[in-house]
Image (cartoon, helix red, strand yellow):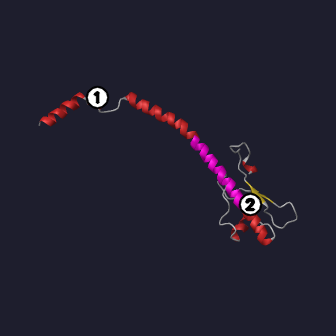
Amino acid sequence: MVISSRLRQYFKTKRHQLGFTLIELLVVLAIVSVLLTIAVPRYFQSVETSKETVLAENLRIVRETIDKFYGDTGRYPDSLSELVEKKYLRDLPFDPFTESTGTWTILPPQSDAKGNVYDIKSTAQGIRLDGKPYGEL
């Protein structure tokens, strides 16, 4: 009984300290908002950087595959889907900026070589973080 009366007396005197005040909550919200203003721009920049990296890697792989196809057959493919049909690629390359597999600009060979696909470029609008357009990758 003595312990419970002492606890009651303690909580009666400390009742105002059991919760957070409005000022404490506002200070915490202010700190969180400052941290978010620092973190959010970096997050979106990292998303753009990763899209650029994926685009560059997809272009590198497709160009390498076109060269392998030419080395094996002595001609360039007639379309990107021919690379998939002949099992040089598992699937058509994905452009992370246009979010599509069919928006590539296909460049034909400049010489008298057979085939229609010598190189591909992205049709994405915009400029990379280094200042060059996406279509120049």
Is residue 44 highlighted in magenta?
yes
* Residue 15 screen position, x and y as percent: 26, 30
Label 2 sits on what residue type? Arg
* Residue 2 screen position, x and y as percent: 12, 35
Instruction: Quarter of the image for the N terminus: give it.
Output: top left
**Mark whose residue sits in front, 2 or 1:** 2
Label for residue 16? 1
**Residue at disc 2, secondary structure:** helix
Q: Residue at x 87, y 62 (%)?
A: 111
Instruction: Please tell me whether residue 89 is drawn above or below residue 95 in the rendered image.
Output: below
* Residue 131 screen position, x and y as percent: 72, 42
* Residue 62 screen position, x and y as percent: 71, 61
Q: CA distance from mark 2 to mark 1?
A: 70 Å
Q: Which residues are magenta?
A: 42-63
Crowd class of label 2 (few under 14; some 14 to 19; many from 20; radius 10 Å): some
Instruction: Please tell me whether residue 46 is drawn above or below residue 60 in the rendered image.
Output: above
Q: Can residue 79 be spotted in the picture?
A: no
Magenta region, main secondary structure: helix
Q: Residue at x 83, y 61 (%)?
A: 109
Instruction: Please tell me whether residue 104 is drawn above or below residue 4 in the rendered image.
Output: below
Label 1 sits on what residue type? His
Instruction: Please tell me whether residue 31 is drawn above or below residue 135 in the rendered image.
Output: above
How many marks are shown on the rendered structure? 2
Report the residue marked by disc 2: 63
Upstream in sequence: badge 2 or badge 1: 1
Q: Is 123 or 5 nearer to us in this picture? A: 5
Q: Can residue 119 be spotted in the picture?
A: yes
Q: Is 137 or 98 nearer to us in this picture? A: 137
Crowd class of label 1 (few under 14; some 14 to 19; many from 20; radius 10 Å): few
Q: Residue at x 64, y 50 (%)?
A: 51
Is residue 40 highlighted in magenta?
no
